[in-house]
Amino acid sequence: MTTRDRTQSFVLGAATVAMGLIAGAFYVFGCAVMPGLARSDDRVYVAVMRDINDVIQNPVFFLSFLGALLLSGMAAWQARGEPYRVWVWAAFVAYALVFLVTVAVNIPLNDALARSGDPGALREEFEGPWVAWNVVRAVLSTVALVCLARGAMRRRAV
């Protein structure tokens, strides 16, 4: 195995791990965090989501959130001309859409929730759209994970 092969394997593996972490995070929000919060009154809901939005902005989360994008992009670039490239590029595109949804929709909703106001009104504007777009992020990041895993399997078969 050449140094180039080892580097490609490492980058593809790291991209797959980062994507799995992010897909899992969005999945947990969809399956447990948001349904659990839905049982709360408006004041508690808004306070807890504000706290979550504050604490999720940390180096560990950013490493996997940005790492999934950068590593899958790097893996896609390294795979050019290879038979498994379609899977890796599909993963990169799917996760680029996740990144776009996060920046264009979820973060602005988080920012709006951080403003002062009536908790009931804030929650009404936030909850439905945020949950719906988080489902989109969960599905797309899971698709990206599956594509990276498929690409890795196809790469090993080459």
Image (cartoon, rainbow, N blue to C red):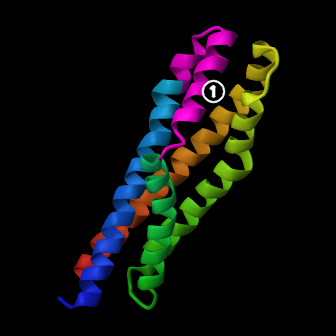
- Is 45 left, or right, of 153 in this rendering? right
Asked if residue 79 is positioned above or below residue 141 in the image, the reply reads below
Q: Is residue 36 left or right of residue 21?
A: right
Percent across and percent down for residue 139 are 53, 47
Specify start and end residues of the magenta stretch as a single range: 34-58
- From the image, tell me which residue sits under label 1: 50
The vertical placement of 141 against 26, above or below, is: below
Q: Secondary structure at mark 1?
A: helix
* Residue at the image point whose x is 62% and y is 12% from the top: 44
Q: Nearer the viewer, residue 85 or 67?
A: 67
Residue 86 in sight from this viewpoint: no
| Corner quadrant of residue 43 | top right
Name the foreground residue: 33 vs 83: 33
Question: In percent of the image, x 47 and y 29: which residue is there?
Answer: 31
Q: Is the stretch drawn in magenta largely helix, strand or loop?
A: helix
Of the pair 83 and 131, the residue shown nearer to us: 131
Q: Is residue 72 above or below residue 141?
A: below
Q: Position of residue 6 (x, y in %)?
A: 24, 81
